[in-house]
Every structure is written in C-alpha cells, then in structure tokens.
Image (spheres, grey):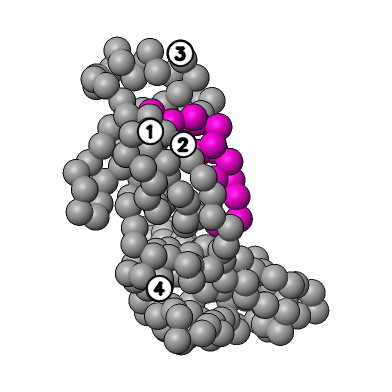
Amino acid sequence: MDKLKVEAQPRPGRGKNRARELRRAGQVPAVVYGGAAEPLALAVDPRLIEKILHSESGQNAVLTLTIKGHGQTAAMIRDWQADPVKGRVLHVDFLRIAMDVRLKVKVPVHLRGEPIGVKQQGGILEPVQREVEVECLPGDIPDDFVVDVSELAIGKGVRVGDLKIDNRKLRILTDPERVLAHVVAPKAEEEKPAEEAVVAAVAAEAPAEPEVIRKGKAEAEGEEAGEAAPAGAEGEKKEKKEKK
C-alpha cells in the first residue's frame, strides 16, 4: 500500500460563511482528531482528497498529513461529505493513527470469474456481502478481497470463512458464516410453481358455480312441474263429471 501525502493548513474560524470562503478559494474545511493531540480544524485541497478516495485503497488509504506549524502525522480519512449533485468533496474528517496499533476497518469484496451455475445452468450470481470488517495494523490493511466464483453452481455460495488470509496479520471480525455471494435459480422458474398452483386452485373452484346454477334450475323445473300437475288433475275430474 503506497503512503500518500496531504498538506493542510490550520483553519482560523469556523461557520458556514468561513466554509464558503474556503471553497471559493479552492479549499475545503477539514478536521483531524484522535491520538493524544487535540482536534484541529484544517483547510485542505479537495483534489487530493478525491484522488485518495478514488485510489485502490480508497478510504482505507494510510496517508501522511503534513500540517503547517504542527508537523506530520499518519492519518486516514474517517469520513467526508460530498455535494449530492456535483459530487465534489465539501468536508473531510481525518483520524490520527499509530502505525504500531491495530485498528478496525472495512475492506471491500470484489467477485472474479463467471460461475458455471450462470454459464452452464442459466442461474444468477447474487452478491450478498460487499465488505468485510477486519482488525490489523495500518500497514497491513488490504486494498480488497478478491473472491473467485468460477466454480459456483446453482445453490452454491462462498462465505466469509472461505477467505484466504494471513492470520498473523489479519483478524476477520465479520461472522464467518455470512454469505459473500451465491448463485440462485432464475426467478421465472421459482415463480412458475406458484403460478401453476393458482391456476389449479381456480380450476378446482370453477365447477362450484355451475353446480349452484344446476341446482337452482332443477328446483325451478320442479316448481313448474308441480304447478302443471294440479291443472291436469283438475281437468280429468271435470271430464269425468261431464260424462256422468
């Protein structure tokens, strides 16, 4: 990991107006804290910060912070604010660090290769855990973890515990059972049985309505037959009476 250099100046005064003045002058407000020294308000060149954040190490880059009138200190970018529209850095927080003291950082996970479950079985590769927390000395912070997923079939995955690390330098704090990535079946195939079940349920319920209709029709026909019977009986009685 290359150590970067950032020059900073003490920042007199605080507040929104002072911050605007700094930005118009091509600098941004910053603060450095941590260690035995007191927090110190600074002004730095935002282009240097953007360069660090876009480097391979990113936020985990160890840098040398040179403060005018206060000497040098090893530091890392702990936090920053950016313009939501233009993406420009607006403020930076630096953390003083000691190169012989272990610290906790989050390291990004990058996937490499095309799984056989995707290439041969039509599955989908799903990233699950995109970073892993580790504890180590500042000089041992890895830029990233590269995971080869080429051998993953559908239903298979790789976990945090599968990462190959140097246990003498790194200690992984993330749960080793956490899944980093896995290959799943296409959603269309997963939803198909559910659709078939719905169709079957509708088909099973379909005869219920005609049965009710038939029952009502039968009852109606019975009523019509019942009403016609008395008329026939009464006609027979009338015919016999006339013969007499």
- How would you rate the neighbour count of disc 2 (Cα within 10 Å): few for under 14, some for 14-19, many for 20 or more? some
Label 3 sits on what residue type?
A: Arg
Q: Nearer the viewer, residue 227 or 88?
A: 88
Q: Secondary structure at mark 4?
A: strand
Q: Which mark is residue 7?
A: 2
Pointer 1 residue: 68
- How would you rate the neighbour count of disc 1 (Cα within 10 Å): few for under 14, some for 14-19, many for 20 or more? few
Look at the picture and state if 33 lies above or below 230.
Answer: above
Marks 3 and 1 sit apart, C-alpha to C-alpha, by: 21 Å
Which callout, 3 or 1, points to the residue nearer the camera?
A: 1
Q: Which mark is residue 154?
A: none
Identify which residue is drawn at 51% across, 45% down.
Answer: 5
Q: Secondary structure at mark 2?
A: strand
Can residue 114 be seen by looking at this rendering? yes
Identify which residue is drawn at 57% across, 62% down.
Answer: 1
Residues shaded magenta:
42-57
Which callout, 4 or 1, points to the residue nearer the camera?
A: 1
Q: Secondary structure at mark 3?
A: helix
Marks 2 and 4 sit apart, C-alpha to C-alpha, by: 26 Å
Pointer 4 residue: 136
**Residue 27 forms part of the magenta stretch:** no
- How would you rate the neighbour count of disc 3 (Cα within 10 Å): few for under 14, some for 14-19, many for 20 or more? few
Marks 4 and 1 sit apart, C-alpha to C-alpha, by: 30 Å
Pointer 3 residue: 24
Q: Nearer the viewer, residue 23 or 40?
A: 40
Q: Earlier in the sequence, mark 2 or mark 4?
A: 2
